Amino acid sequence: MSLETTCAALADPARRGVVDLLRRRPRRASDLAEALGTSRPAMSRHLKVLRTSGLVEPVSHEADMRARMYQLRPDSFRQLRNWLAEVERFWTLELDAFKRHAERTRSKPR
């Protein structure tokens, strides 16, 4: 999926909450709804957005094959991580250059 789709999916605080919960372990939609204080229909809509964006996927639970669990798809976060790393590199270079400039300017007599 595109970076825009990923960012749009993560723009909602409830969906970021789902990602935070799923970082720890797979969970049922009802457990996610309860943990985040949302209704089941609202959670279903959030999960649909996250599935469509490729950030989460349903998996079968070994103990009960009828129970649909959700888990993160870590590879789907790669594009976001790469973009954030590029932004961080840019700002690190810019701030280093500013620091050097400020130190040169400060050390010159007026």
Image (cartoon, rainbow, N blue to C red):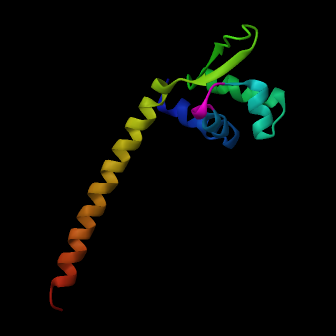
The residue at the point 75 percent across, 14 percent down is 67
Q: At 79% from the left edge and 26% from the top edge, which residue is drawn?
A: 30
In the image, is residue 99 above or below residue 11? below
Q: Could you say where residue 59 lies in the image, as x and y percent from the top left?
A: 63, 14
Residue 110 vs residue 21: left or right?
A: left
Placement of 79 over or under 85, stated as above or below: above
Question: Farthest residue toward the top?
Answer: 65
Q: Residue furthest left?
A: 108
In the rendered image of this protein, does residue 98 appear above or below residue 11? below
Q: Is residue 30 magenta?
A: no
Q: Residue 101's quadrant in the figure?
A: bottom left
Identify the residue at image location x=76%, y=37%. 35
Q: Is residue 48 in view from this perspective?
A: yes
Count of numbered circles in the view: 0
Picture coordinates of residue 27, whole percent (x, y): 69, 26
Q: Quadrant of residue 80?
A: top left
Q: Is residue 2 left or right of residue 90?
A: right
Screen quadrant of the C terminus: bottom left
Residue segment shown in magenta:
22-26
**Helix, strand or loop for the magenta stretch, by majority:** helix
Residue 79 place in picture, x, y as percent:
42, 31
Determine the residue located farthest toward the bottom in the rendered image.
110
Which residue occupies the foreground of this view, 62 or 66? 62
**Which percent across, then down, holds residue 14?**
70, 39
The residue at 61%/29% (across/down) is 25
Q: Is residue 25 magenta?
A: yes
Instruction: Report the side of 105 relative to 7 (left or right).
Output: left
Front-most of residues 85 and 66:
66
Residue 44 visible in the current orientation: no
